[in-house]
Image (cartoon, rainbow, N blue to C red):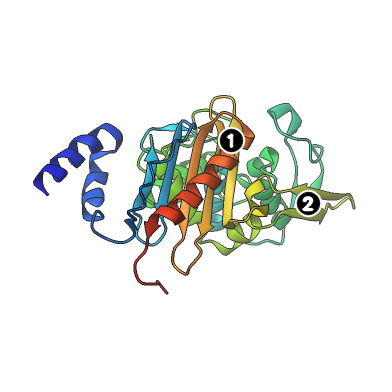
Amino acid sequence: MFNFLISLIIASQLVAPVTEIAGLIANKEAYPKRRMTGSFEPVVEAESALVLDMETGKILYQKNGFKQRSMASITKLMTAVVFLENKTTWDKKIKITQDDKTNGGKLVWKPGEELGLKDLFNVALIGSVNSAAYELARATDLSYDDFIKRMNSKAEEIGMKEANFVEPTGLDARNKAMAMDIAKLTKYALNQPEIKNALTMSDYTFVAVSGARHTIKNTNKLLKSYLNIEGGKTGYTEEAGYCLANMVKGPEAGKDIVVVILGAKSEEERFQQNKFLSQWVFDNWEWGKARN
């Protein structure tokens, strides 16, 4: 046991902040536990990956899970959290001021179009529309700068050790966090009913004030897979690569996990590796007695 502790501390110094070491040691003997299946550790091509048990916070798999990386549109989870914390009403119309196409996104609407605040919120998450996220940051009583400051202070509150936010969309490569941070953010955000509801919709249709009808599709293709996805967020920029954070409901009650992929090389790879890691964990870890 002594040798194990020494080895764990040395290894942890290489991959994790010192503050995480005690948790790694304390969780070794607790459920969930690794099954003796003879299975090798999975090979993941993405730059970073991490799987977290929802109930205990135990890490079930990680590759560079404590290395800070650009997070792209996963940023929008924090934008939604801070927006919900500071909104006063849904009964508001918002005029779009940004052109998404010029910012590297898909053109959903043109600047000057007006829509309801709830539609704006859902579009920002479901379609990962940059202009919608930007308008959310301007739709509370906070100034834009104070909104960004609150994104960072909220990150500290929920235990994100290496997170940094400079804007609400994820377009800026300086929006960074570790995979471990993103797992914590995903868990926290999806405990908010409005966020979970949006991120489990496969598509969304709304009507703007002008009468124009729009339909957007969820960027998370795993919603239509065999996995029971409880919500998740995609992201992509050239600097960040292809990213995906999902909450996955286990085959039995209480066996729920968060799976994070950062820096995959293609859109297909991020989905396949997220799905592969989910299945590998369910096949190779046991949770003991059923949880309520």
Residue 198: quarter of image: bottom right
Residue furthest toward the top? 238
Classed neighbour count for the residue bearing mark 1: other residues with Cα under 10 Å, few (<14), some (14–19), many (≥20): some
Between discs 2 and 1, the one toward the N terminus: 2
Q: Position of residue 176 (x, y in %)?
A: 46, 34
Please tell me whether residue 81 is drawn above or below residue 163 in the rendered image: below
The answer to whether residue 154 of the structure is visible from this angle is no
Q: On the image, numbered disc 1 is attached to which residue?
A: 269
Q: Residue 12, image x and y in percent?
A: 24, 38
In the image, taking residue 166 as reference, residue 106 lies left or right, namely right
What's the amino acid at mark 1? Glu
Vertical order, 288 against 166 (above or below): below
The amino acid type, in three-letter code, at marker 2 is Leu
Q: Which residue is mark 2?
A: 115
Q: Secondary structure at mark 1?
A: helix
Q: Is residue 40 left or right of residue 113?
A: left
